Image (spheres, rainbow, N blue to C red):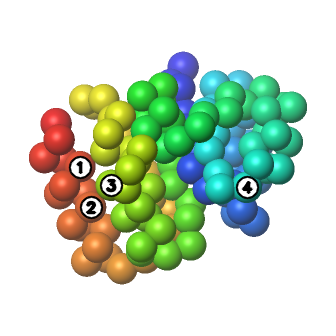
Amino acid sequence: MAKLGFIGLGIMGKPMAEHLLAAGYTVYVCDLLSEPVKELCSKGAVACSCCKEIAQESDVIFIMVPDTPDVEAVLFGGGGVAEGIRPGSIVVDMSSISPIATKEFARKLGALG
């Protein structure tokens, strides 16, 4: 079974991660706030200290953060997904952001291998 990473545990992200846990997946989680991370860890999730760690541990990485700059920071900022992503990993961005930015982010990630 694939190992899943979930970045962004707000109103939408936390319930999604809970459903993945309930389905039996190993879910690695990261959020700016500690409370949703603690709550999900009590249900079996594994806490990660940064987005890079999520990428190192996960086969599929889900991102659910508010806006384009947030997605860019998660992917390419210090300790971001791009620093830890493995070849063959899948990134699923579920944020409501600019499609132009999404295509550019996908291009940059694809160039990493």
Q: Are marks 2 and 3 in contact (CB under 8 Å)?
A: yes
Observer-side mark, 2 or 3, equals 3
- Where disc 3 sits, the SS reads helix
In this view, the residue farthest toward the top is 1
Q: Are marks 1 and 4 in contact (CB under 8 Å)?
A: no
Rounded to the nearest angstrom, the CA distance separating label 4 from label 2 is 25 Å
Instruction: Give the image location of residue 105, x and y in percent.
Output: 26, 61
Crowd tier of the residue under label 1, counting other residues whose Cα lies within 10 Å: few below 14, some 14–19, many 20 or above: some
Crowd tier of the residue under label 4, counting other residues whose Cα lies within 10 Å: few below 14, some 14–19, many 20 or above: few
Rounded to the nearest angstrom, the CA distance separating label 1 from label 3 is 9 Å
Which quarter of the rendering shows the C terminus? Answer: top left
**Residue matched to label 1:** 109
**Nearest to N terminus: mark 3 or mark 4:** 4
**Nearest to N terminus: mark 2 or mark 3:** 3
Rounded to the nearest angstrom, the CA distance separating label 1 from label 2 is 6 Å
Asked if residue 62 shows in the view, the reply is: yes
* Mark 2: amino acid: Phe
Rounded to the nearest angstrom, the CA distance separating label 3 from label 4 is 20 Å
- Where disc 1 sits, the SS reads helix
As drawn, the label of residue 33 is 4
Q: What is the quadrant of residue 112 in the picture? A: top left
The answer to which of 65 and 92 lies nearer the viewer is: 65
73 to 18, vertically: above or below = below
Q: Are marks 1 and 2 in contact (CB under 8 Å)?
A: yes
